[in-house]
Image (cartoon, rainbow, N blue to C red):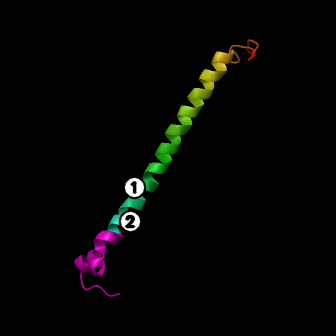
Amino acid sequence: MVWNSFSEFLAMGGYGLYVWGSVAATALVMALEPVLLARRQRTLIAQIRRQLAADGRSTGQAPRSRA
């Protein structure tokens, strides 16, 4: 396809809103994914540390039985 101007390029032959909306949505998801993964990792590590502390493993004590 040949565009005579930048505005024609952005319009994408009448499909510009769909094309650029899709590009924006994909870019947003790709930018958020590492942030959300890092946040989830920090949450899981904190949860594991709390569980280990509750079991007494981080203080060197014997774990409590789960009878």
Which residue bears the numbered disc 2? 23
User: Which callout, 1 or 2, points at the residue further toward the start of the chain?
Assistant: 2
Q: Are marks 1 and 2 in contact (CB under 8 Å)?
A: no
Nearer to the camera, 44 or 8: 44
Question: Image quadrant of residue 4?
Answer: bottom left
Identify the amino acid type marked 2. Val
Residue at 43% x, 53% y: name it: 31
Q: Circle 1 — which element?
A: helix
> Given the current orientation, which residue lies at the most extreme front position?
67
Mark 2 residue crowding within 10 angstroms, few (<14) / some (14–19) / many (20+): few
Residue at 33% x, 65% y: name it: 21
Q: Position of residue 18 (x, y in %)?
A: 33, 70
Q: Position of residue 55 (x, y in %)?
A: 68, 17
Nearer to the camera, 18 or 10: 18
- The label shown at residue 36 is none
Residue extent of the magenta highlight: 1-19
Q: Is residue 24 above or below residue 31?
A: below
Residue at 62% x, 27% y: name it: 48
Identify the amino acid type marked 1. Leu
Q: Circle 2 — which element?
A: helix
Question: Image quadrant of residue 66?
Answer: top right
- Magenta stretch encompasses residue 44: no
> Given the current orientation, which residue lies at the most extreme bottom position?
2
Instruction: Report the magenta stretch's main SS.
Output: helix
Q: Is residue 35 above or below residue 66?
A: below
Nearer to the camera, 66 or 19: 66
Residue at 43% x, 55% y: name it: 29
Which residue bears the numbered disc 1? 28
